[in-house]
Image: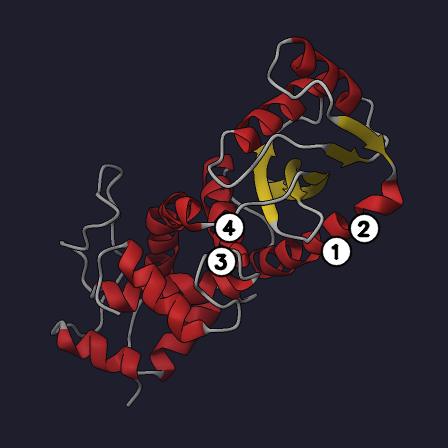
Amino acid sequence: MGSVAKLAMGSGVGMIGPEEAGEGAGVADFKGRHFTGEVILWAVRWYLMFPVSYRDLELMLADRGVEVDHTTIFRWIQAYAAALEKRLRPHLRSCNGSWRVDETYIKVKGRWTYLYRAVDGRGQTIDFLLSARRDAAAAKRFFRKALGQPHTVNPRTVTVDKNAAYPKAVAEMKEAGELWRRTRLRQCKYLNNITEQDHRRIKRLTGPGLGFGSFRTARRTLAGYEAMAMMRKGQVRKIGGRDMKAQAAFVAELFQCAA
């Protein structure tokens, strides 16, 4: 019998149906859940790391002796994915000042939205932002969000594609003192290949879900995808990108849960 099944049995739980996740529930508190924190975090990590659907993960858990409805797994992701990303941020290694910025498309309620993403010259994730529009205002929101992260620095260079919104956004932010005046904007598509390749990781994960049902659901789930991607890139201090045991223990520690 697998370790996940043992953890579930330790909570004295058998088969359950869909579980409600209250909006005000504390993310570090697993009280009221039908499963232990270890089981929940195992499911959350695996969903956010690999291209599986909620039904796929339901079958994987059943194979390990844990009976849980796929809608419950969905609620776990909504409750803990964004919290994981937020708690992960202070533990990230600093990114360098070479920003590569690009957008990719994400389907939400049957419509295409824009996922702004940036990596540094080494491919380390800087930040991301889901936006309904692709304009200068959205670009400025993204840059402000990225500049406010604890692991980022004011960029020396910002490499983007030919989108006309970027020069306007950068110029306005420089004038307002939000962006370093010596920051150089480069509009060169081939220099952004590293970002476009990094998009594939996210697109591979979103594929099985065939889009998101709401903007809020998309934002929370994508935050979890990005968090696990940063961990697997080795961006977390003292945690190897290929060391899944250390990653599991680190996530458990973030949620004050025994690994």
183 in relation to 49, above or below:
above
Tell me if residue 54 can be seen.
no
Residue 95 vs residue 170: left or right?
left
- Verify CB contact (< 8 Å) between mark 2 and mark 4: no
Instruction: Please name the residue that numbered disc 2 is placed on.
Output: 193
Report how far apart the C-alphas of labels 1 and 3 lie in the structure: 17 Å
Q: Which mark is residue 164?
A: none
Q: Which residue, as the protein is rendered here, is positioned at the far top? A: 175
Identify the amino acid type marked 1: Gln
Instruction: Please name the residue that numbered disc 1 is placed on.
Output: 197
Report how far apart the C-alphas of labels 3 and 2 lie in the structure: 22 Å
Instruction: Please name the residue that numbered disc 3 is placed on.
Output: 228
Identify the amino acid type marked 2: Asn
Dot 2: element:
helix
Instruction: Please name the residue that numbered disc 4 is placed on.
Output: 93
Dot 3: element:
helix
Whichever of labels 3 and 2 marks the residue nearer the N terminus, that label is: 2
